[in-house]
């Protein structure tokens, strides 16, 4: 049986490219993970998600534990079989979404109790319960249960929350046990304070994990503050383990994170944007509902090889969006996921070739052009 392992192949500045090996297949890094919240990447068949170039997707513990429940998914053969996705799956710990979605949360040293946002039923997640849920789901990469404080917060509050997360990291490690072929990632906290980030990284590396996430970012602090943390925080983590930035982001966030040494990211943006008529291209963002597209026979992006661009005009995409047709979300989501994976592939190639800076310059130059002129 293949063990979980990470090979770093090339670096270019702080940017890195490599491969994560898992029993369910390889993950080329830097990797972008589409989000399959409720055991589906919305509007996409799993084989279509794979066709965009995704090596791994993310499932949400909070949503799945409430509906259809982890126990039911386990009885039905696990999440891979349930949703017909045979490649690797990473699951979050549930902590972040409890904080952002659930009602009547109560946080103690033991864990978090809350009421479901779906039916008001009462639940508890502890580090031990989070490990159990993620095991029942059959997740390949399991995340530690942590607490993510809302920013801005005082240094003292951020420090207290970070230390609680470190105690929970140890409990997560103990509860996870020895599961060959499955990985457990620790999550660094510490807000925007270098000393707290370093303390958190040291606590996690003492415990020892298969990979390390940089948590507590992409929660509204803004790109400059996020890049400020990414300028130093990845350097506190072991070089030979994957680094995962949670919940990022827009294409320029992703490029800036990779430049600073991040290996994995996830975001709902490409799929969520696809359902609201937003397309991401090399030349920036396109709002397909704009009237300027109504008579435009050209594709979203002449050079894109996705089905939405190969086979459909802007005029058609505009029409089906305005008509509330389901194919609108399907095509735009496919294009967006394809574009995000294309960026990742180009960055992997540029890092391997030692040309990341030139690639990044071109990436920004194309975006600065803006969308093609209206006809
Ligand atoms: Zn396309």
Image: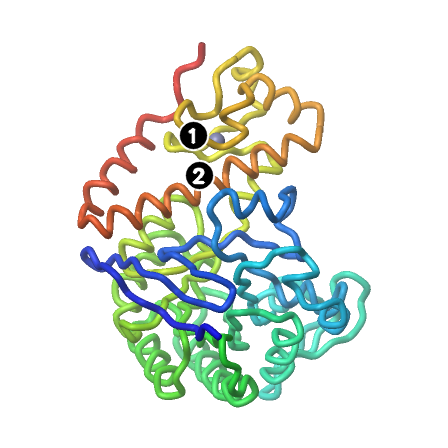
> Are the residues at dot 1 and dot 2 in contact (C-beta closer than 8 Å)?
yes
**C-alpha span from label 1 to label 2:** 8 Å
Dot 2 falls on a residue whose secondary structure is helix
Confirm whether residue 171 shows in the render.
yes
Residue 12 occupies quadrant: bottom left
Which residue is more in the foreground, 43 or 152?
43
Residue, disc 1: 304
Residue 325 occupies quadrant: top right
Dot 1 falls on a residue whose secondary structure is loop
Residue 170: numbered disc: none
Q: Which residue appears at 66% of the width and 31% of the height? A: 327
Within-10-Å neighbours for mark 2: few <14, some 14–19, many 20+: many
* Picture coordinates of residue 87, whole percent (x, y): 54, 59
**In this picture, residue 233 sits left or right of residue 35:** left
**In this picture, residue 180 sits left or right of residue 136:** left
**In this picture, residue 312 sits left or right of residue 162:** right
Q: Which residue appears at 37% of the width and 47% of the height? A: 344
Residue, disc 2: 339
* Picture coordinates of residue 62, whole percent (x, y): 65, 67
Q: Is residue 212 above or below residue 278?
A: below
Q: Which residue appears at 54% of the width and 23% of the height? A: 311
User: Is disc 2's CB within 8 Å of ligand 1?
Assistant: yes
Q: Which residue appears at 18% of the width and 57% of the height? A: 13
Question: Along the polypeptide, which appears first: circle 1 or circle 2?
Answer: 1
* Picture coordinates of residue 292, whole percent (x, y): 52, 15
Image quadrant where one finds the C terminus: top left
* Picture coordinates of residue 121, whole percent (x, y): 80, 71
User: Is disc 1's CB within 8 Å of ligand 1?
Assistant: yes
Q: Is residue 210 above or below residue 259?
A: below
């Amino acid at each position: 049986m293949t063990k979980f392992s990470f090979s770093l192949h090339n670096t270019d500045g702080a940017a890195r490219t490599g491969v994560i090996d898992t029993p369910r297949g390889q993950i080329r890094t830097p990797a972008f993970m589409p989000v399959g919240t409720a055991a589906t990447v919305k509007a996409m068949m799993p084989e279509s998600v794979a066709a965009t170039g995704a090596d791994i997707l993310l499932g949400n513990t909070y949503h799945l534990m409430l509906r259809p429940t982890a126990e039911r998914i386990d009885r039905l053969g696990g999440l891979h079989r349930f949703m017909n996705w045979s490649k690797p799956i990473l699951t979050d710990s549930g902590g972040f979404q409890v904080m952002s979605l659930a009602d009547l949360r109560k946080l103690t040293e033991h864990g978090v109790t809350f009421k479901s946002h779906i039916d008001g039923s009462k639940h508890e997640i502890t580090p031990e319960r989070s490990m159990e849920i993620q095991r029942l789901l059959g997740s390949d990469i399991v995340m530690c249960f942590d607490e993510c404080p809302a920013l801005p917060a005082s240094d003292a509050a951020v420090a207290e929350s970070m230390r609680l997360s470190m105690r929970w990291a140890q409990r997560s490690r103990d509860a996870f046990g020895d599961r060959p072929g499955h990985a457990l990632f620790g999550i660094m906290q510490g807000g925007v304070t270098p000393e707290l980030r370093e303390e958190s990284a040291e606590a996690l590396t003492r415990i020892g994990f298969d990979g390390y996430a940089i948590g507590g970012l992409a929660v509204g602090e803004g790109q400059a503050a996020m890049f400020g943390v990414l300028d130093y925080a990845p350097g506190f983590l072991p070089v030979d383990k994957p680094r995962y930035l949670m919940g990022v982001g827009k294409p320029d966030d992703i490029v800036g994170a990779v430049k600073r040494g991040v290996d994995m990211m996830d975001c709902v943006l490409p799929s969520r944007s696809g359902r609201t008529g937003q397309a991401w291209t090399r030349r920036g963002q396109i709002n397909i509902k704009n009237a300027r597209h109504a008579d435009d026979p050209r594709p979203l992006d002449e050079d894109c090889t996705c089905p939405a661009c190969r086979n459909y005009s802007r005029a058609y995409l505009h029409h089906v969006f305005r008509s509330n047709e389901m194919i609108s979300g399907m095509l735009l989501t496919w294009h967006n996921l394809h574009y995000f994976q294309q960026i990742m592939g180009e960055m992997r190639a540029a890092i391997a070739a030692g040309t990341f800076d030139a690639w990044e310059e071109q990436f920004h130059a194309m975006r600065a052009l803006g969308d093609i002129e209206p006809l």
